[in-house]
Image: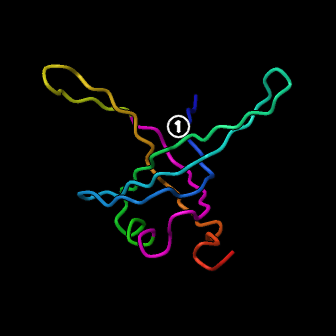
Amino acid sequence: MRTVNRHTVLGHVGNIIPLKGVLKVNVATNREWQSDGERKTATDWVQVTVLDKKQAEWIEENVGQGDLVYIESRISNSSYPREGEQVYVTDVIAQLFNLVSKSRAHGQT
């Protein structure tokens, strides 16, 4: 039996944070629904971790705040001890990162 660990994100970049050996990209996604006949919207933020050095360099050079990006990733779970308690972390690890369109704030569409 085959299994799949795939997560897809299509959203706008909030910020890009370079850290030791990795790049964190915060991406805003919107969702809409109806409740009691009223249309509702909410923004969810996904923090994507980029481990590939070449990919991280390309993102830093070519992607900016507000840009629309498409990301295929995998989910990774880990844990570590902190102050006597076990902390559990779920990471979204980028495997494919595409720039769909530049933000108008950057003077392009």
Picture coordinates of residue 53, whole percent (x, y): 34, 65
Image quadrant holding the C terminus, namely bottom right
68 falls in the magenta region: yes
Picture coordinates of residue 98, whole percent (x, y): 58, 64
Tell me the element at label 1: loop
Judging by the rendered image, the residue that carries numbered circle 1 is: 5
Q: Dot 1: few (<14), some (14–19), or many (≥20) neighbours within 10 Å?
A: few
Q: Quadrant of residue 82?
A: top left
Colouring style: rainbow
Question: In the image, 45: left or right of 17?
Answer: right
**Residue at 74% over, 37% down:** 32
Residue 90 position (above or below residue 61) = above
Residue 11 position (above or below residue 75) = below
48 falls in the magenta region: no
Q: Quadrant of residue 20?
A: bottom left
Residue 100 position (above or below residue 25) = below
Question: In the image, 86: left or right of 60?
Answer: left
Furthest residue to the bottom? 107
Magenta residue span: 59-76
**Residue at 56% over, 54% down:** 71
**Residue at 34% over, 32% down:** 89
Residue closest to the eye, 67 or 48: 67
Image quadrant holding the N terminus, namely top right
Furthest residue to the left? 84
Picture coordinates of residue 11, whole percent (x, y): 61, 53
Which amino acid is tagged 1? Asn
